[in-house]
Amino acid sequence: MLGQRLSDLPTPLLLLDLPTLERNAGRMAQRAGALGLAFRPHVKTAKSMQVVQRMLGSAAPRITVSTLREAEYFLAGGIPDITYAVGIIPDRFERAARLLDAGARLTLVSDCPEVVGRLGRFARDTGRCFDLLIELDVGAHRAGLPVDGPDLLDLGRRIAADAGLRLAGVLTHGGHAYGCDGPEALRAVADREALDATRAAERLRQAGLACPVVSIGSSPAAHALGDPAGATELRAGVYVFNDLDQVELGCCGLGDIAVSVLASVIGHNRAAGRILLDAGTLALSKDAGLTTGVGRGYGLVCDPATLAPLEVGTLSAMSQEHGLIAVTDARAFDRLPVGAKVRILPNHACITSAAFDRYVVLAGQQVIGVWDRVNGW
Amino acid sequence: MLGQRLSDLPTPLLLLDLPTLERNAGRMAQRAGALGLAFRPHVKTAKSMQVVQRMLGSAAPRITVSTLREAEYFLAGGIPDITYAVGIIPDRFERAARLLDAGARLTLVSDCPEVVGRLGRFARDTGRCFDLLIELDVGAHRAGLPVDGPDLLDLGRRIAADAGLRLAGVLTHGGHAYGCDGPEALRAVADREALDATRAAERLRQAGLACPVVSIGSSPAAHALGDPAGATELRAGVYVFNDLDQVELGCCGLGDIAVSVLASVIGHNRAAGRILLDAGTLALSKDAGLTTGVGRGYGLVCDPATLAPLEVGTLSAMSQEHGLIAVTDARAFDRLPVGAKVRILPNHACITSAAFDRYVVLAGQQVIGVWDRVNGW
């Protein structure tokens, strides 16, 4: 595919615009530096060595992963400093141990006393020591202990007292930033996340426990953060691609979206006022984005060369291999004859990208690379 | 993984229950026979040679595909009689031609005069001949020409007059069956689809054109069809796995769902009333099923061994690698400690299955096979 032009590519295909990617990567690395935070990009969106090299730039090579498969892939690619930011469970102790044995500087995450107890025993029984971050719930109500109350100190003491474990610090994920309406609300949530994480760290330290790492993050919070308080580390992932959700949150513009799905018009249904594309649920996902039901549709249909929105209608219905544009102007059928190509900007880049096993990398209209992805578990 | 027991398997994992699959396969094959229709299973759900062998049973090996990649895979597996049921576009002529050259008895589908004209020219220029079905819109308002009106006869004549093409017949997909409320409405839609397809075929024949194939289908319509009228061929795919959508439509019971996702409990958030699973958007998809917003959630959480619903709460929120159960009864935390396993029945089996590259095949609690899938395009 190398050297081919956009107009010659098969569809559906996941395209990655390299100049946009590099601009996004540089902007966030600079931002983390300006905030005085160590930057640990989350690789769950990109899942690609070539992308992550650009996220890291000249910074220290440390990453966040969402699966142990990612950890194995990036370790093999030469990045040993890895935080696995999903709560560890006993069934994964052996696989995590193999990562340590292979040279990873692996940090695990937990909020569960029973699991921590079993991990400590496993570590001691096998002559290992695991670094552990305590996950905190600062408002997303996914994983994490409350910042206040006895559970945090109890778990901190338990980890510190276990010869098989080392208390690395605390970790928050402010996923509720995705519910914010406007930049001020976003900044308030981001600053509050940093403050809460700092308060938790202070509580541990006042109890005589070490808490070197105070890790916070999400792309919207990373963009919006005004005062990092006592945070030491920033995590973010989707910012390197961006998507319609990030645009809606005010984190970027349409021109900052680096991934798109190249699709072909495969039919007209004039009687029903629909144009059919070959990008359906399997190519775009059924992630309706932050504004479910408000009419954004399943992605924004754009000109393949300029990426300008085509304004032919909304990609309002999907089946497995069909995306259906509800046409708002009958001239759309002439603008998009059967066989024509479009590029679709995704609602949620993490999920759309996972539908493909590789990126076709463009600079302008030309293919300059094909980069792999490490999907699955 | 062969010979392992359910309790030893890693998560998330796509499980396939072989006895249920075989029962579903046999039931539909028998139904098509009883209706007097040639059965041409749609392989887009299963995308697996081993599954499709069971769909075909002792019947003539003919299939329907949704991608040319499926066509290539199944031809290589020994099934040459293939209908590619997504409208062909010029960019795919060469790839379709290679299938013919490799021995496929390939039938293409179109509703577009411009494409048909170009396909005929391509065929004549390269010394080939393509079989073509005309797609009809009988109410789904996806692809297809109206059954009545001049377009059908115009296209039929155009195909018949082209030495590079052979008019194979007509094809309908009654996707609007998925909007039906109850078995009577479903039967009415299915019977109407058969009648409409038959009327279109009669119109072509009265115009002196051949129309040997009258192909209808969708799993709900295949279950519900009472009178096939002049249909000759039945297509259906998801019936072999079933899912919560099929249950809701009344096509099967929970015990007839052959695919499930094995997941682990990876956390408790007692303060928020949530149990966290390691099956999130990437493992289950964000397909909310037919009842978006009505509270079914993103899948049904079941006992891993018995597949009985656990009734611990609704899988109501998803992020990339987390599925979040909103707990309705605090005892759920004791029933599902961190590390416990569950099996999740999917809303939409076609989409959930596509998140995995293989099936772990069970008979009872034991792994008896690992079957591949042909994802992508």
Image (cartoon, coloured by chain):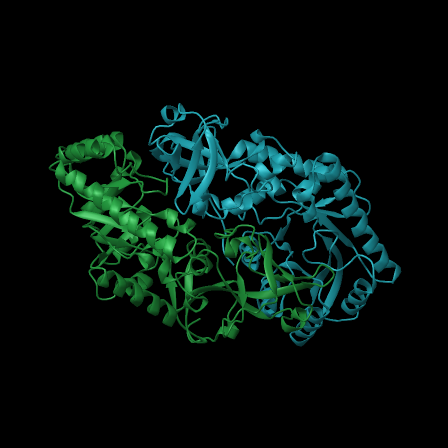
Chain colours: A cyan, B green
Could you say where residue B121 lies in the image, as x and y percent from the top left?
18, 31
Seen from the viewer's position, the closer of residues B227 and B112 is B227
**Can residue B374 be seen here?**
no
Is residue A104 depicted above or below B201 in this figure? below
Seen from the viewer's position, the closer of residues B277 and B332 is B332
State left or right for residue B142 relative to residue A43.
Answer: left
Could you say where residue B39 lies in the image, as x and y percent from the top left?
24, 57
Seen from the viewer's position, the closer of residues A330 and A93 is A330
Residue lying furthest right: A206
Is residue B76 depicted above or below B98 in this figure? below
Could you say where residue A136 lies in the image, as x and y percent from the top left?
74, 56
State left or right for residue A341 relative to residue B167.
Answer: right
Could you say where residue B149 lies in the image, as x and y percent from the top left?
25, 32
Say which residue appears at 80% left-offset and 40% top-offset: A227
**Can residue A309 be seen here?**
yes
Q: Quadrant of residue A119?
A: bottom right
Q: Quadrant of residue B57?
A: bottom left
State left or right for residue B152 relative to residue A250.
Answer: left
State left or right for residue B20 relative to residue B309.
Answer: left
Q: Quadrant of the N terminus of chain B?
A: bottom left
Q: How many marks?
A: 0
Q: Quadrant of residue A317?
A: top left
Residue lying furthest left: B208
